[in-house]
Image (spheres, rainbow, N blue to C red):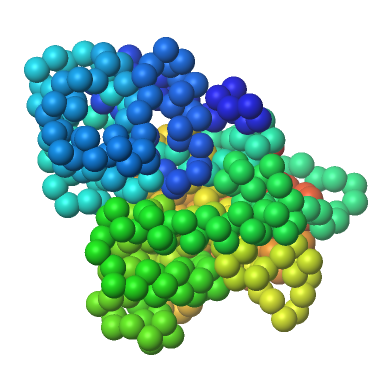
């Protein structure tokens, strides 16, 4: 294990990268466990954080002298706070190219920041750390994503079909390690303070913003609209800002790993596909705190838990890709007939589809999206899953090699 509670299944890939790459960069949202993981990988390695204002000032005043004074093996934490250091690290690595010299961690996506890609190209391996997946929280060795790619999902019919219990609690809890050690009001308070801290500190590291409260209002609105098609003009109108400003704020939230823009799947032969991306809040615990959803709302007719469930399932499968196959591509499918598939997964030319339903009972029309995607993918189609709130796993006749799968299989 790489922290006191949970394994991080990405750890072996980081160790492998350190064995042959001069710089390994661990990126992910603040408080997702990057520092704990980095320290556990090499206990003898020096550790410096740019959250220390005096250290940050020294590095900014003399980046070359700072880098030359560093120990042979060092972790530099929160490196997005000083991007001007990266060209100096590049020059140092070019002089002495030893594997595993630097671990960099960042709470902003450095690859999206201007000028950084050129500094890092060819000298660094980027690895993304998400908040804890449910698979990691439960210490499960089973990966549903791996089973789907392997074609090893098999029917399992139980004597008494019944709704699954506890799904809402899992979604509301989310994946950040700290609130997972709390419950109820204490976890809610942590999430609220987390957002405030990000707005007051981390936003300023990557952009010049006149009013960070507008970014906060946009994030709250996105929590309410998670798993919906992105409509930037509508978001801008509701927040009371210009469309261009809304686009800038969306980019900032993506840079900080708070939201994910899921692109639309495309096929050159298909003319009727919607090209608009979907927007997802990355962590559903945070999204529930911002939108006011709690586990008791699961069966409420006045509050729709379905989009939050979709964002949760998407995040779990993308997390698992980190240790199953980091080259997988993710998108969503929607056409002009309003037929959709929540998640499209591509491995080279191979295509899979995943639909997510809150209900514990299904209708014949529920496989329509997978059937349409299968017809569009043609010979590249490999199969798919319809994740649902029931407890039986069985074949879905709507499309080839598709199964209805209980949501709890996402974690074991």
Q: Quadrant of residue 262?
A: bottom left
Picture coordinates of residue 332, whole percent (x, y) = 43, 61
On-image quarter of the C terminus: top right
Front residue of this view, candidates 132 and 167: 132
Name the one closer to the observer, 126 or 153: 126
In the rendered view, tell whether residue 108 sits above or below residue 243.
above
Image location (x, y in percent) of residue 377: 39, 56
Q: Does residue 99 appear to the left or right of 407 in the view shown? A: left
Q: Is residue 117 visible?
A: no
The quarter of the picture where residue 38 lies is top left
Residue lying at 72% horizontally and 65% vertically, measured from the top left: 294
Q: Residue at x 74, y 51 (%)?
A: 183
Identity of the residue drawn at 14% across and 47% down: 115
| 21 sits left or right of 49 in the view | left
Question: In the figure, 271 relative to 285: above or below?
Answer: below
Q: Quadrant of the N terminus?
A: top right
Q: Residue 347 lies in what quarter of the image? A: top left
Residue drawn at (67%, 54%) of the image: 187
Q: Position of residue 299 (x, y in %)?
A: 78, 70
């Amino acid at each position: 294990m790489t922290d006191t509670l949970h394994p991080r299944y990405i750890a072996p890939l980081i160790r492998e990268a350190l064995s042959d790459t001069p710089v390994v960069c661990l990126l992910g949202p603040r408080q997702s466990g990057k520092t704990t993981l980095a320290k556990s990988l090499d206990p003898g390695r020096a550790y410096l954080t740019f959250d220390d204002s005096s250290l940050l000032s020294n590095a900014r005043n003399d980046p070359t002298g700072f880098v030359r004074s560093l120990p042979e093996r060092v972790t530099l934490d929160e490196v997005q706070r000083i991007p001007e250091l990266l060209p100096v690290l590049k020059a140092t690595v070019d002089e002495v190219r030893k594997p595993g010299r630097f671990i960099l961690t960042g709470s902003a996506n450095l690859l999206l920041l201007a000028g950084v890609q050129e500094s890092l190209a060819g000298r660094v391996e980027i690895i993304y750390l998400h908040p804890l997946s449910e698979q990691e929280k439960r210490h499960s060795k089973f990966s549903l994503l791996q089973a789907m790619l392997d074609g090893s999902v098999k029917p399992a019919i139980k004597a008494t079909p019944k709704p699954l219990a506890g799904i809402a609690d899992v979604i509301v809890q989310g994946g950040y390690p700290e609130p997972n050690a709390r419950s109820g009001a204490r976890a809610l308070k942590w999430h609220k303070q987390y957002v405030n801290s990000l707005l007051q500190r981390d936003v300023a590291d990557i952009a010049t913003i006149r009013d960070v409260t507008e970014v906060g209002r946009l994030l709250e609105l996105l929590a309410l609209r998670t798993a919906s098609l992105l409509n930037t003009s509508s978001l801008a109108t509701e927040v009371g800002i210009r469309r261009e400003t809304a686009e800038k704020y969306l980019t900032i939230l993506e840079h900080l790993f708070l939201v994910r823009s899921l692109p639309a799947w495309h096929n050159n032969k298909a003319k009727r596909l919607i090209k608009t991306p979907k927007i997802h809040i990355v962590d559903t615990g945070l999204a529930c705190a911002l939108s006011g959803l709690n586990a008791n709302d699961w069966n409420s007719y006045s509050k729709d838990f379905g989009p939050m469930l979709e964002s949760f399932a998407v995040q779990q499968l993308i997390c698992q890709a980190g240790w199953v196959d980091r080259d997988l591509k993710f998108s969503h499918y929607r056409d002009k007939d309003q037929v959709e598939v929540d998640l499209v997964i591509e491995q080279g030319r191979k295509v899979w589809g995943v639909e997510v339903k809150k209900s514990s009972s299904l209708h014949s029309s529920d496989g329509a999206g997978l059937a349409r995607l299968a017809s569009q993918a043609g010979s590249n189609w490999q199969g798919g899953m319809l994740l649902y709130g029931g407890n039986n796993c069985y074949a879905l006749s709507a499309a080839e090699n598709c199964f209805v799968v209980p949501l709890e299989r996402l974690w074991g």
